[in-house]
Image (cartoon, rainbow, N blue to C red):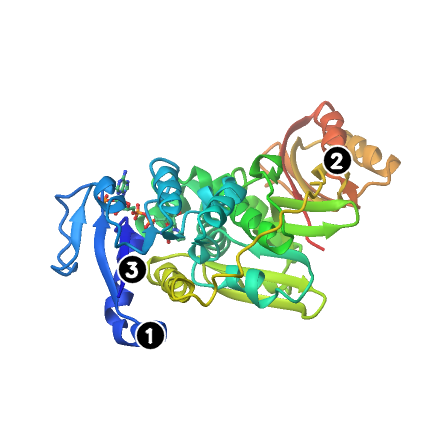
Amino acid sequence: MISIALLGFGTVGSGFYEILKREEEKIEEKINDKVSIKYILVNDLSKNREQISSDTIVTDSFEKIIADENIDIIIELIGGETPALDYIKRSLSAEKIVITANKLLVANYFKELIKLAEKNKTHIFFEASTGGGIPVINMVEDYLAGDKINELHGILNGTTNYILSVMEKETVSMPETIKKAQALGYAEQDPSSDLGGLDALYKIVILANLAFSCAVNPEDIYCKGIKGITSYDIMYAEELGYKIKLIAAAKREDSGLRIFVSPFLIKKDDDFASTVGADNSLEIKSENLNHLFLKGPGAGKFPTGNAVIFDLIKASRFLLGDYKKSRSKKFNNIKINRKSDFKQSFYIRLQIEKNDSIIKNIKSMFDESNLADMILKDGSSDTPLLPLIILTRKISIQKIEKFMEYVENINGVLTINNIIPLKE
Ligand SMILES: NC(=O)c1ccc[n+]([C@@H]2O[C@H](COP(=O)([O-])OP(=O)(O)OC[C@H]3O[C@@H](n4cnc5c(N)ncnc54)[C@H](OP(=O)(O)O)[C@@H]3O)[C@@H](O)[C@H]2O)c1
């Protein structure tokens, strides 16, 4: 009998539990043992949880759980840093196997948690932390163990992808779309981690750590989310043959590793253009497979619950001895290349006064530096403003930002609205 304590019974916890109950026989046959959820830890004991069977103890005391020597596996589905980090560390120290969906903790404490597991001859599994229902962790860590991964590109945040997809389809503002996403459960009440790119950053850090055997500090990574992107950007991008997507990427380079999260203009025939709504996708470029593209549900009760079930099966095999010897991890010291020296083309939207001499002035600035193709947009006849769209040639973000500081100071230039790179 494998005894489990489930910490958290929210979206993912209840999804995992319901799948386990529904497919119990099949899962136990796979594991070749019985599975018992002995405890479920929650915050609020007064909530109705009638689906939980009477032989499971619902508690708000982690102390009770950690004191129980018969627990084999602890599944952390609380989220956030406190108290989840403490619970995971204490579980590993008590030689329990840990399963978690907590991307924040796995990304920020990757080396520490893996080393702690190793020290205690146990293991931490985190398939559900990245890619929701797509088995990306398993793919990068195990399936491609005999391959050499060179690049990872992903749409790894379902919330922002949903927001951008709705804005593209319905030409609605971002605040309105966020409200819609919240009502449908696609966005949290505080969506800042999604909108600011942090959620995608944690996920690409986890994937990069596995793919390149390192332990990247998320704070070292260039991260820009989708705040500030408007329906205008989406509309102008569309006219030019592009869509806007939030892309997280990690790329092996001669001098180190380049990792970033940023919105990109992507061509309509790019594989990522078909990742719509709350879906996620991951493109892997490697020596053996050349190119692999995975797409599927990036979050949600059952897709994420399914990933936890997958980890449970792996964890059970570990517990039964199959994997016990294969867990030593090496952490390479890899230089993280800064964003400043990376050359790419950019889409720039600025607002100027509708005046021929101002347009001429800006054009000559760009012409002199041989920097860009410029596309003028007509402001409607009764407005004195003109949106100006510029597609640059390849240049580093540092240089274009500096250049745009000059442009911003030209008389008649009102605002630089957005600078977004173009995906090759
Ligand atoms: N939601 C998704 O689609 C998704 C996808 C991938 C990964 N994840 C990750 O999965 C984890 C869980 O997310 P979720 O969406 O399931 O969260 P959630 O719906 O907010 O559920 C959190 C659960 O944890 C319990 N909890 C909160 N604070 C606690 C505390 N101090 N002590 C004990 N229990 C506590 C809550 O108890 P009460 O029920 O009593 O309030 C609730 O049952 C997070 O790390 C998240 O990033 C989520």
Res 190 label = none
Q: Nearer the viewer, mark 1 or mark 2?
A: 1
The residues bearing labels 1 and 3 have C-alpha atoms spaced at a distance of: 23 Å
Q: Which quadrant: the N terminus?
A: bottom left
Task: Tell me which label, 1 or 3, sits earlier in the chain.
Answer: 3
Does residue 405 sit above or below 424 in this rendering? above
Foreground pick, 326 / 172: 326
The residue at 77%/30% (across/down) is: 403
Give amino acid for label 1.
Asn
Q: Nearer the viewer, mark 1 or mark 3?
A: 1
Locate residue 6 relative to residue 178 in the image: left or right.
Answer: left
Q: Residue at x 35, y 71 (%)?
A: 31
Q: Is mark 3 within 8 Å of ligand 1?
A: yes
**Quadrant of residue 282 within the rendered picture:** bottom right
User: Is 181 left or right of 329, judged from the image as shown?
Assistant: left
Dividing the picture into quadrants, the one containing residue 73 is bottom left
**Badges 2 and 3: C-beta atoms under 8 Å apart?**
no
The residue tagged 1 is 32
Residue 404: percent from left, percent from top: 73, 31
Kindly identify which residue carries mark 3: 15
Secondary structure beneath dot 1 equals loop
Q: Earlier in the sequence, mark 1 or mark 2?
A: 1
Pick the quarter of the image with the C terminus. bottom right
The image shows residue 164, relative to residue 26, as above or below, that is above
Q: Which residue is mark 2?
A: 400
Tell me what residue is drawn at x 68 percent, y 63 percent: 285
120 or 100, nearer to the observer: 120
Q: Amino acid type of disc 2?
A: Ile
